[in-house]
Amino acid sequence: MLKEYSDIEMIFSVDIWVEEMRNESYNPSLLYKTQGVEPGNDVDNIAKNVILLCLQTEFRKEMAKKFGNGKVIFIDSTHSTTMYNFLLITVTVVDEFDARVPIAWAISNDEDQIKFFKIDQGHCWKSQAKILHV
């Protein structure tokens, strides 16, 4: 039987996981803002009640560089994935075979907070690409 975790335990375990990722040679956590905390300097205009975790593996970063330069970027949100009503947001680009390639993911409780897609800064893709929210 699976153990049920309290909200505090879940937040604490995500905090620990993100901190562990930050200490790896490649940090896949592009951005992390926990719920109930004022956003830091790396996060613009995200409300205090929003949780936002953005992830991109090293391989996905390379795919973003290869296929995300000035092309179409698709953003797809999956609703009702947990009892907490978090959204799983997937960012994909189109490869040379016109197939979608996932390049980053976000977990958030607010679909309007997908502003992380604009962080660019060498992490992901060129911001002049056309973004389609599907």
Image (cartoon, rainbow, N blue to C red):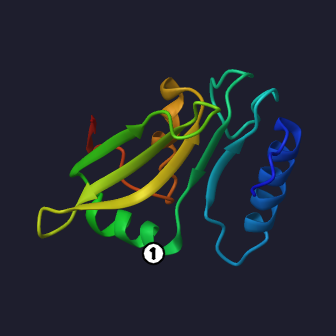
- Residue of label 1: 59
- Residue found at the far front of this picture: 1
**Looking at the image, which residue is at 63% across and 23% down?**
45
| Residue 109 lies in quadrant | top right
| Residue 36 lies in quadrant | top right
Q: Is 40 left or right of 96, judged from the image as shown? A: right
Q: In this rendering, is residue 63 above or below 121?
A: below
Q: In this rendering, is residue 37 above or below 26?
A: above
Q: In this rendering, is residue 121 above or below 28?
A: above
In percent of width and height, residue 3 lies at 81, 53
In percent of width and height, residue 67 lies at 26, 64
Q: In this rendering, is residue 109 above or below 99?
A: above
Type of the residue with mark 1: Phe
| Between 56 and 17, the one nearer to me in the picture | 17
- Disc 1, SS: helix
| Between 82 and 120, the one nearer to me in the picture | 82
Instruction: Give the quarter of the figure containing the N terminus.
Output: bottom right
Q: Is 97 left or right of 113, judged from the image as shown? A: left
Instruction: Give the quarter of the figure containing the C terminus.
Output: top left
- Residue found at the far bottom of this picture: 25
In percent of width and height, residue 106 lies at 53, 46
**Looking at the image, which residue is at 35% across and 69% down?**
63
In percent of width and height, residue 38 lies at 80, 27
**Looking at the image, which residue is at 47% across and 50% down?**
120
Disc 1 crowd, CA 10 A, few/some/many (<14, 14-19, 20+): few
Give the total number of marks visible in the rendering.
1
